[in-house]
Amino acid sequence: MEVLSSIGNKAYEYSHVASDLMSTKANPIPVMSWELIASGALNISHSEFRYVFSFFLSLAAGQTSPPPVLPALRIPSLVSRSKKLEKLPALLEYPSPMSTDLISGQQERKLEKLPSLLEYLSFVFCMGNLLGGPFLEFREYKHFIDGTGVWAFSAKQPRPSPVIPGLYLVGQALCFMCAHIILVPSWGLSNLFSDYYNAHSLLARFSMQALCGFAMQMKYYFVWKLSEASLTFAGLNLIGFETDSSTPIWGRCTNVNFVGVWFTDSARKVPQSWNIGASTFLRRYVYERISPKKGRPGFFHLLVTQLTSAFWHGLYPGYQVFFVGTAFYLNTASVIYKLEQQRFFPAAIRNASLWHVIKVVWTGTSLTYLAMSFIVSAHELLVLDLDKSVAINRKILDLEKSEVLDLDKSVAIYRDVYFIPHIIMVAFALLGLVLPRPPQKTLSVKKEL
């Protein structure tokens, strides 16, 4: 214990920034009872316990799935926000799998040399990453810093101006922010606990939940588009140039696609449009690693991947409920796809415009329905200003804790619509167990940028 206390004290003395990052005073995550019990048993402070817990959690994650790429990318906080010193244990070097065991995408992303501390920290705290999480692989970032790859400019291929595309993204971000400010007073979370909401029909309550989800999504669009704008101004968002042309193509760091989220007809496509960076990370560094080398990954592998994302977001029941639900949500889309591929539906249904509309409506409304537990858990915590008038805000935070972290409220919202989407998704999960498997095909991994 003395060693742990010494490490904590040294870190505090080293930098005011380090102490702020480790301090729970600037941490919007409230103190949980099990943390107090554990820190008391170990005879260390609550701040030290969170740091040590994150440290060993990072080590455990690395040992169970040693990646062949930048070790930093396995740390949960990098997926969402780079704010804690828990990322530092990622600098430890783990043995990498044999190169023959790597699929093509992993071969392209792997690093032959562990980055220096300066390279690592510059990646963690670079523009965009600090605000919204990593949008790209370290190898791409290294090419950008070294001026290689698509960033190897010359007189024939000069550096493109990022001003217009960057301002365009800023404009999008401001529009999403205005939409959030306008919509939340009328269609925010509090509306779902009003007499007006309870007095309406089942279909109306589903619609109000969808409007609430839409309104709350706007703030995420704002943050991600603003982050993408900062990366565009820096030049990191450059994909390349059109063939036989100097016209630049932007979008390497795009993290959200509004149209793709709300107008897709399959939940399998939603991760390609919502929080794209985190979805890509989970696919590459969790789903692909736990999937069997021979055979097809199943629902279990999907559930483990979603639970990993749940733990990264926070140890709150609302997050766990949401991400477990998304595993069933994605699995339902897979079962529907199998039914279509195996021609359980007549061609007249599969190709009908009405069937497409039904799938679009189901994909959007079921996602916002599941997201209610996430929204309830995250509501208002992100906007509390704990740096000003800490004593006053502490009282506000205590009040908000009982309001936003109450699992009963999430269940109440689900109960208002009789858990219908959950029942449908469980039914499809059971149906998937009895569906005949399609003939095994050789799976190939698409080449990724």
Image (cartoon, rainbow, N blue to C red):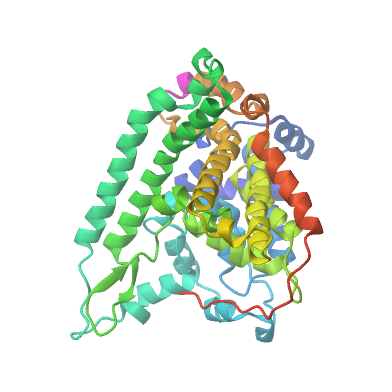
Where residue 367 sits, quadrant-wise, is top right
Estimate the x, y position of residue 374 in percent, counting from the top left.
58, 37
Between 219 and 302, the one nearer to me in the picture: 302
- Residue 55 makes an appearance in the image: no
The percent coordinates of residue 389 (x first, y second) are: 42, 23
The percent coordinates of residue 214 (x first, y second) are 44, 37
Q: Which of the image's four quarters has the C terminus? A: bottom left
Range of the magenta residues? 389-393
Residue ID at (48%, 68%): 137
Let me know if residue 204 appears in the view: yes
Report the magenta stretch's main SS.
helix
At which x and y percent is residue 354?
A: 50, 49
Residue closest to the eye, 110 or 286: 286
Query: In this rendering, is residue 157 above or below 75?
Result: below
The residue positioned 29% from the left and 48% from the top of the image is 172
Above or below 252: residue 173: above
Task: Pick the residue in front: 114 or 378.
Answer: 378
